Image (cartoon, helix red, strand yellow):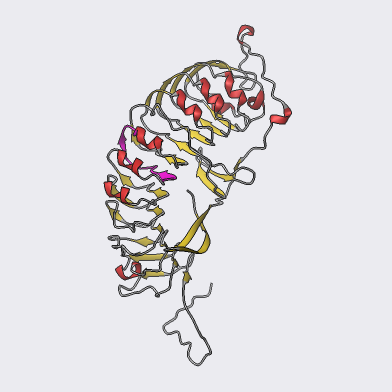
Amino acid sequence: MVEMRFEDLILSDNEFSGLVLDVLALSRNNFSEELPKNIESPTFLWFLSLRENNFSGPIPQSLVQCLALLLLDLSRNRFSGHFPDFNPDTELAYIDFSFNDFSGEVPTTFPVGTRFLALGGNKLSGGLPFNLTNLSNLERLKLQDNNLTGELPNSLSRISTLQVLNLRNNSFQGSIPQSIFNLRSLRILDVSNNNQTGEIPQESHSQWFPLDYRDLVVNWKKSKQGISTNKLNICTLLDLSNNQLSGQIPTSLGVLKALKLLNISSNKLSGKIPTSFGDLENIENLDLSHNNLSSSIPPTLTKLQQLTILDVSNNELVGPIPDGGQMSTMVFDPNYFANNSGLCSIQIRVPCPKEQLTPPVKIKEDDHKEPWLLWESVCIGVLDWLAVSNRNHVRYWVFYPTISF
């Protein structure tokens, strides 16, 4: 490895003309130490990425004062201290400070035009501030892997543009507000690994529409799972796993026809698996494991032509596992049906009494669809898009790679 150190950079006696620095990307290097306190962004700089280095210390206030700055990515460093106060007149739309060492409460000094805000993987504490509702253009809010507490506020529903809300791995408690499910633009909701209690809201919004992501990686069953939208541009995820939710699973979840992944495992849910789950026509991964569900697996699940993973292990289910349709062709791991009261099937080597056998459901070959969600052993990443505007006209379209969702 060659180490280069610059003390002076001299570009005199050349024929440069009209030299304007508007993009600076120093990602994935070994830069370290603190940024100078008096560092200033070039006047025309609109793209600044220092991600995946070893920078430390506070972010200089002068760095975020550039009016032209649209994208600022300082993720995966060791920045700490207080967040800077952003210039309210800046057009900054993309802010990624994730996976650093910031502490304290969630700041509210971000520009009103912010569309992407990633603060996950820090040491933030306290609750979600009401002032987040001032970010009226916010599309993605990522606060996962912090130490946030308190209840989820109803005020989140005021951010009508919100498409992705990631709050996993915190210490939120109380019930999940019904109002969150009324966000018409919401595509991904992840509140897994918290202390949420009460029941799953009864009236989930039926108009969660498809969202165009290129490639997405999510953590699913302790593994990186790649989602490719090669043939379908639908990507919708609902993860409420590893909480303290109780009561019955609402049948209204069955109207979320765009869902690809539904994970409500490791809660205290009881009652039957809703027959309406047979209407989740795009579902590929359904995890209901580690609950107190009883009765039988509804035969309507055989209609799910995209289903590849069904995990109902560690419940109190009985009767035959439905046969036919996708249930005969999906990934069939006996561990996904283990530790129930009385499930039976040839697949798990537990024969059913003849009176319990159900005839297989026949599916037309024309109805078969190619699986959309694939397992991957490496992280593919999200190809985030950013429409870069300059007040009244579009200047650039930026395709900018980031990690996870």
Residue 288: tell me if it is visible. no
Residue at image position (42%, 40%) is 190
Q: Does residue 123 appear to the left or right of 220 in the view shown?
A: left
Up the image or down, 138 lies above or below 270; here it is below
Residue drawn at point x = 72 percent, y = 26 percent: 364
Give the vertical position of 208 relative to 31 (above or below): above
Q: Residue at x 48, y 24 (%)?
A: 314
Whether the magenta-drawn stretch holds residue 71 is answered as no
Question: Residue 152's spot in the image, x, y percent?
Answer: 31, 39
Whether residue 388 is visible here, answered yes or no, is: yes
Residue 106 spot, x, y in % from top left: 29, 51
Quarter of the rendering containing residue 322: top right
Count the labels in the image: 0
Compare residues 332 and 200 and report the one nearer the observer: 200
Residue furthest to the front in view is 392
Q: Residue at x 40, y 53 (%)?
A: 118
Q: Which residues are magenta?
A: 162-177
Residue 171 highlighted magenta (yes or no): yes
- Extreme residue toward the top, this view: 355
- Dominant SS of magenta comes to loop
Q: Could you say where residue 82 lies in the image, as x and y percent from the top left? A: 27, 60
Query: Residue 218's x, y, as percent?
Result: 51, 44
The residue lying toward the viewer, choosing from 336 and 175, is 175
Task: Pick out the residue farthest to the bottom.
Answer: 13
